[in-house]
Amino acid sequence: MLLTRIQTAVSLIYPSQCMGCGGLVGSDFGLCGSCWAEMHFISGTVCEGCGAPLPGEADGFRLECDSCLRHPRPWSQGRSALLYEGRGRKLVLALKHGDRTEIAHMASGWLERAVQPMLAENPLICPVPLHWTRLLKRKYNQSALLAEAVAARIGLEHCPDLLRRFRRTPALEGKTRDQRFQHLGAAIATHPGREGRIKGRTVLIVDDVMTSGATLSACTDACLQAGAAEVRVAVLARVTQA
């Protein structure tokens, strides 16, 4: 009873705010109606390679988008929670560059729903890594926050340092697909002290945004080279124009 009264008093002094625009909402870590209307969640028929939405209905065969057909992915399955546009894009950018780490808690719920078809074999969850210099500047790895939160929600094993980015690459925003793959080449590898956890396992790699797939491809190659049986990927948002 006392705790309820305290919580009520706190809510009156500090009412819950929309994670998108700062307006008042009914509960913590939520969105107001206007921001929710600007979100583009992915549902229905999707590409098995990257999770992009597809027209029509599933027919029992593997379906892939044009991008995945043109550029076969080294991973086996991929899912995305939302499209990288509208309010979703603003939230991803706020999480990535705006010190809005609390967004990861809300977004992990969206990712949890997206990854449900990829949980067979209880995959080991890990994030896409940041180079230490970028991590020092940004203070956190947004992909690591998402991976940790998703693993906690689902109750699966999580290894935050399974992968390492041992060579710094330039910012990939604005780069062409070929430039992205060229820069990422051999920049990512498995942590030498974690190879025992990956051999023969299914790995689920988590990232915030997929554009060309170059970063996820480099991570997947590193996992397979270290002995992973299979690699799947999950991203918060998918850029469909890649």
Image (tube, rainbow, N blue to C red):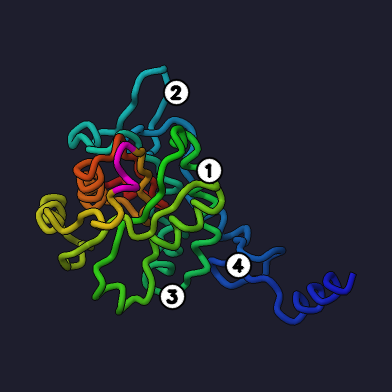
Q: Identify the residue under disc 4.
A: 18
Front residue of this view, candidates 88 and 80: 80
Quadrant occupied by the N terminus: bottom right
Which label sits in the foreground, 4 or 3?
Answer: 3
Whole-number angstrom distance, CA of label 4 to CA of label 3: 16 Å
Magenta span covers which residues? 196-200
Whole-number angstrom distance, CA of label 4 to CA of label 2: 34 Å
Whole-number angstrom distance, CA of label 4 to CA of label 1: 21 Å
Of the image marks 4 and 3, the number of the one nearer the N terminus: 4
The amino acid sitting under disc 4 is Cys
Q: Quick one: label 4, few (<14), some, or many (20+) residues within 10 Å?
A: many
Q: Identify the residue under disc 1.
A: 113
Q: Identify the residue under disc 3.
A: 99
The amino acid sitting under disc 2 is Glu
Residue 64 image point, x, y percent: 30, 30
Q: Secondary structure at mark 4?
A: loop
Q: Quick one: label 3, few (<14), some, or many (20+) residues within 10 Å?
A: some
Q: Quick one: label 1, few (<14), some, or many (20+) residues within 10 Å?
A: some
Q: Identify the residue under disc 2.
A: 57
Whole-number angstrom distance, CA of label 3 to CA of label 2: 39 Å
- Left or right? Give the position of 223 relative to 5: left
Residue 226 image point, x, y percent: 22, 45
**Do tag 4 and tag 3 residues touch (Cβ < 8 Å)?**
no
Residue 121 image point, x, y percent: 44, 33
**Magenta highlight on residue 197:** yes
**Do tag 4 and tag 1 residues touch (Cβ < 8 Å)?**
no
Residue 79 higher or lower than 188, as above or below: above
Residue 171 higher or lower than 224, as above or below: below
